[in-house]
Amino acid sequence: MTTDFWQDFDLKIALDDVLRGQGADPEIVRTRRPALIQAAERALAEGGRRLRPVALVRELDVVELRHERLILADGSALTGQLVARHLGGSMRIAAALCTIGFALEIEVTRTMGENPILALALDGLGNAAVELIGQEVCSRIGGWAETKGLQASTPLSPGSPGWPVEIGQPQIFSLLETSQAGIQITAGGMMYPQKSISFVVGIGTGVSQTEPCELCSLKDVCRYSHD
């Protein structure tokens, strides 16, 4: 099994990214919570050196779709109603794991007792960083697909309605050499380091392309969703 190991990320993280990573609205924070702005600025200045961005990516041909099981060329399968609906038209899939490592996570824990506002800003930095890594990985997969005259689907992550974490997460991990990045999974599907994400992208001529929010279990209550 061969897994591509990517470390060449140049993350451009803005102040607003850190605020959104904390679940805050940047416009409101700027008018009402100057202390959060100062903490976010400090997090950007001090936390960046603790980011260890890594992505593992593996592409596999799709053999067939059979009874909500997407059978892959190595004999493994991705299963579930959402998998069948969202990835069923794919010729290939790309499975990905992204992380920023443990260093920032350790710093958040260390800082929480003495400066909780800064700790939350550092945590927001981590959220923003891993999201940007995921976006960059999707962009690279999409660019490769275009060179072959194909399309890449919207990424599908475990935890989306119809693909529970306890089912989807082990399936993705089984496709990748996760020891390369030091990413581990618990029996319940939680990843360590915690600032890690996993997803699958379909590649083909008729793949499903939709807004990522439509695949999210929080779409009806998320404060950042748009009508």
Image: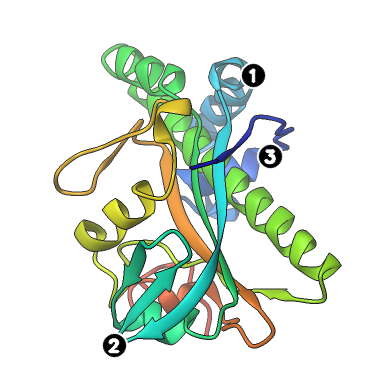
Please determine whether, in this image, residue 146 is positioned above or below residue 198: below
Instruction: Indicate which disc residue 14 carries.
Output: 3
Q: Name the residue beneath numbered marker 1.
A: 45
Instruction: Indicate which disc residue 67 carries.
Output: 2
Query: Tag count in the figure?
Result: 3
Q: Residue furthest left?
A: 187
Q: Quick one: 90 or 2, which is closer to the camera?
A: 2
Q: Quick one: 130 or 225, which is closer to the camera?
A: 130
Q: Residue 169 at x, y = what percent?
A: 30, 54
Q: Amino acid at mark 1?
A: Ala
Q: Amino acid at mark 3?
A: Ala
Q: How far apart are labels 1 and 2 at the CA level?
A: 51 Å
Q: Residue 70 at x, y = what percent?
A: 39, 75
Dot 1: few (<14), some (14–19), or many (≥20) neighbours within 10 Å? few
Q: Quick one: 159 or 129, which is closer to the camera?
A: 159
Q: Residue at x 30, y 63 (%)?
A: 159
Q: Residue at x 20, y 57 (%)?
A: 166
Q: Do tag 3 and tag 1 residues touch (Cβ < 8 Å)?
A: no
Residue 22 falls left or right of residue 227: left
Q: Quick one: 18 or 97, which is closer to the camera?
A: 97
Can I make out residue 224 in this image? yes
Can I make out residue 32 in this image? no
The secondary structure type at the circle numbered 3 is loop
The secondary structure type at the circle numbered 1 is helix
Q: How far apart are labels 3 and 1 at the CA level?
A: 11 Å
Dot 2: few (<14), some (14–19), or many (≥20) neighbours within 10 Å? few
Q: Nearer the viewer, mark 1 or mark 2?
A: 2
Q: Residue 174 at x, y = what percent?
A: 34, 48
Dot 3: few (<14), some (14–19), or many (≥20) neighbours within 10 Å? some
Q: Amino acid at mark 2?
A: His
